[in-house]
Amino acid sequence: MTTPERRKMLSSYFSLLREMAGTEFKMKDQGTVLGFLWTLLHPALMFAVLYVVFVKWMGHQVENYGAYLLIGLLFWIFFQKSTSSALTSLARRYPIIRNFKFPREIVVLSAVSAVFYSFLLELLVLLVFLPFIGVPPKASWLLLPLLVGSVVMLSAGVSMFLPLLAAEYRDMERIWDVLTMAMFYVTPIFYPLSIIGDHLRPLLYLNPVTHILIAVRGCLIDGAVPNAGAIAAVTGGSALVFAAGLWSLRRFEGHLMDKLME
């Protein structure tokens, strides 16, 4: 394949992805009373409830607990929402998949991208809000795009495994709801790792979201620049999950289509 042909193919690929992501984004809020405002209300309401419940318990152990909690919630909600949306994406878009030939991962990536649009707005609001709660901008904030890219790659990678599992197990949507609920409590979102016993802490480090939250909070709140090894581990691990998910979806695409037709 020549370079111009490759460029044309990539242009068509990303153009279709952009169109499908835009459609998915618009469909999310269609027919709701508050529409797109729910994008901001959902994390705000969760923050308010968790802050009121845990500030007296955690506030003296975590400096800038409000910022600590907000960052944890925003990144976790993106992971949870994007993977849950992607899980059913191929089934939702089956009429299009059945009638048109294109890379199937575009459907999954469009579901993740639609949630990512909301996440970017929430993140922008967070960055504007942080100085008002005692967290001024720092040079380390420049690393944020790299860490955001890591959580997007991780979420997209996991998301490409989930439709394969959903095709095999009809209860996968409910199973994933339960699993993400359990993951919420074993991820340091509203509590610091320091309160976890030494014998249990390694289990929390098995969760890749934990490492991303540590790096993001270090950059945004502490102004600390993670060492090259930590950055490489976070981005490399996320890229590996993404590559494995993409390979699996393409490898078992035929079997997946047979299952969707049943």
Image: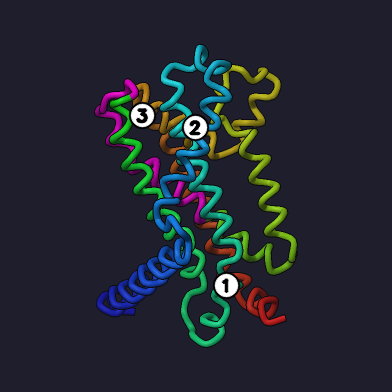
**Quarter of the image where the C terminus is located:** bottom right
Mark 3, residue position: 219
Q: Quadrant of residue 248?
A: bottom right
Res. 223 in view: no
Q: How is the image coloured?
A: rainbow
Mark 3, secondary structure of its residue: helix
> N-terminal of the two: label 1 or label 2?
2
Mark 2, residue position: 48
Q: Is residue 42 above or below residue 258?
A: above
Q: Is residue 177 left or right of residue 112?
A: right
Name the residue: 56% across, 30% down.
188
- Give whichever of 57, 154 is nearer the camera: 57
Is 147 included in the stretch rendered in magenta? yes
Q: Quadrant of residue 71?
A: top left
Give the number of the mark in front: 2 or 3: 2
What amino acid is labelled 3 in the image?
Cys
Q: Is residue 78 left or right of residue 224?
A: right
Measured from the top left, where is residue 163 in percent x and y? 62, 65
Q: Is residue 21 above or below residue 254?
A: above
Q: Residues within 10 Å of mark 2 (few under 14, many from 20)?
A: few
Measured from the top left, where is residue 253 in percent x and y? 60, 74
Q: Start and end of the magenta stretch?
A: 133-156
